[in-house]
Each structure stands twice: as C-alpha cells, then as structure tokens.
Image (tube, grey):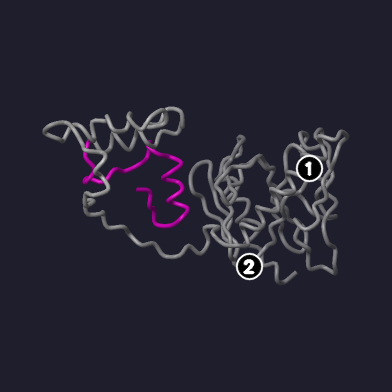
Amino acid sequence: MFQGINEYMTFQQILSFPRDYEWPNSIGTLSKSFMLELLKQDADQRLGTRSYDDMKHHDFFVGPLEDGTIEWGRMHTIDPPPQAQRRVLSEPKYDGANPTWMLEDIKEDMDNAKDAEAMSLGGLHRASSEGMMTEQSDGGRGTVGASATMDEVLAGNWNGFLYPGERVVIAGLVGKKNRAWVTRKRYLLVIEGGKEPRFLYIDPNQLTVKGDIKYHPSMKVELKTADRWTLEIPGRTFLWMCLDDVPAKDWVDAVLNVINVDHRSR
C-alpha cells in the first residue's frame, strides 16, 4: 500500500497518511473505509483493537454480499482473490538502510541508556563522546572537549564544542531520524574555520556530543520541504527536521556555502 520511489519516500507516505495519500482508482469506497479504520494512528481507535467481531461486521465484508454473511470458519478453504501487481523497487543506496547506520544508532541507544543511568545516580554527568566523534586528519587532534553549560548554549555560545579558529555558521534544534524512523531532538552545529567543515549534533538535555559528521568531497545537501532537509555522505543520508524558527532553506544554504569551498587546497 505504501510504496514510494525509494525507502525515504515510502516512509514519508506512512508519516503523512492519510493527509497526502493518493488512493489508486482501483480502491473502492468500502475498501478505503476499511483500510482507514485499520490504519488509524491512535492504536486504541483502530478497528479490531477491542474485538475481531468489529472487523467482521464492517460493511466491507457485509455490504457486497447478497445474504450479508460470510462463513468465517471456512475462509481457509477458499481461494484468495488475485493479488495486485507489486512494483519491485531497486535496493536503496542512501536511505540509511545499511549495517553501519544501524550499528551507529544502536551505540547511540546504549550511550543514552548509560547517560540516563548516570544521571539517575545523582550529580551532573557529562558522558564521554569517545567513539562517537570522528577523528580529524590533522596530526591526531582527536575529539574536541565537548563541554558547555545550558546558559552558554541558550546564549548562543558554542565555544566549548569548537577547536581554535573554528566558528559556528548556523545552529539550531532539529529532529534526527534514527534507523527506526524515530525522531530524536538534537542541537546541530555547522562549523567552519578548520581544515574541513564539521557537522556536530548534540544531546540538548545533557549537552553531550552524539556525532561529528566528517566532511567528504561528494557530500550533498537537499531541501525536501519547508522544515525538512537531508545531508548525504557516502553510505548514509541524514534526515533533519527543523524544530525551531530556523527554516530548512537556511540550513541548506549554509551547508552549501561551507561544502562548496575547495578544502583540498588548504
């Protein structure tokens, strides 16, 4: 039922259903009504949640029949109707459906669990970003000391996350989709001034670095909607959703400005 031109568009169909869904002409009124009842976002309101009898008495099963009955006990002996032809999609290349993305998000889940456990024990805990930061190719400079107070962040002071000479081009609160298409809130920083631009995302509650996306010459950025955009590197596409007053176009323009510089000549 949900089948876009790639995995990303398929998930967009699911997330926006039924608002933007284009029903095929072959779907009749009763079929549409039945599917809408089954696919309600509120699980408690879905048809069949309370009882299978609710589904059995839907007009989809009753209306078209002359006597208004179906022998449910004999359903397993009846030949099913022909199945609609299903379009076969090519294997997604940059939709995030790869083992590397899955492992990274599993590690992020584990880090979040450890952070939460440490916070529950009392005291301010700033989890180490070791392993989540991408080491820079500048003589082993390694990871930046990820440290800032909430007051500094709210004042737009990101210096605790920067190397000397770097500056933040744009920063804001975004939603980051993980492998299960769950949106996590993150501060995202687009940074320039070093050997290469960096793209840092930070847990907004604990102010710990969750990832440092390394620049790549083939990096691409694309505007999807007014509040959604993607950043593509080889093997992975990051989908971002704007959660504050910074529109997606501003993010795209800022990223284009920093990645279009010839960093190889530096």
Q: Residue at x 77, y 50 (%)?
A: 167
Secondary structure, mark 2, is: loop
Q: Please state the horizontal and vertical placement of residue 188, each as a whole percent of the image.
A: 68, 46
Q: Please state the horizontal and vertical placement of residue 218, each as a whole percent of the image.
A: 59, 67
Crowding at mark 2 (Cα within 10 Å: few <14, some 14-19, many 20+): few
Residue 171 falls left or right of residue 177: right
Name the quadrant containing residue 202.
top right
Q: Residue at x 51, y 50 (%)?
A: 223
Residue 7 falls left or right of residue 35: right
The type of residue carrying mark 2 is Pro
The residue indicated by pointer 2 is 217
* Residue 115 - label: 1
* Mark before the other along the chain sequence, 1 or 2: 1
Task: Say if 62 sits above or below 5 in the image.
Answer: above
Task: Say if 198 sits above or below 157 in the image.
Answer: below
Task: Tell me whether the residue at label 1 lies in contact with that at label 2, contact meaning CB atoms closer than 8 angstroms.
Answer: no
Marks 1 and 2, how far apart in space?
Answer: 34 Å
**Frontmost residue, 119 versus 45:** 45
The type of residue carrying mark 1 is Asp
Instruction: Please check the rendered image and state whether residue 69 is part of the magenta-colored stretch, yes or no.
Output: no
Query: Which residue range is magenta in the image?
Result: 1-29
Crowding at mark 1 (Cα within 10 Å: few <14, some 14-19, many 20+): some
Which SS type dominates the magenta stretch?
Answer: loop
**Frontmost residue, 123 versus 58:** 58
* Residue 157 - label: none
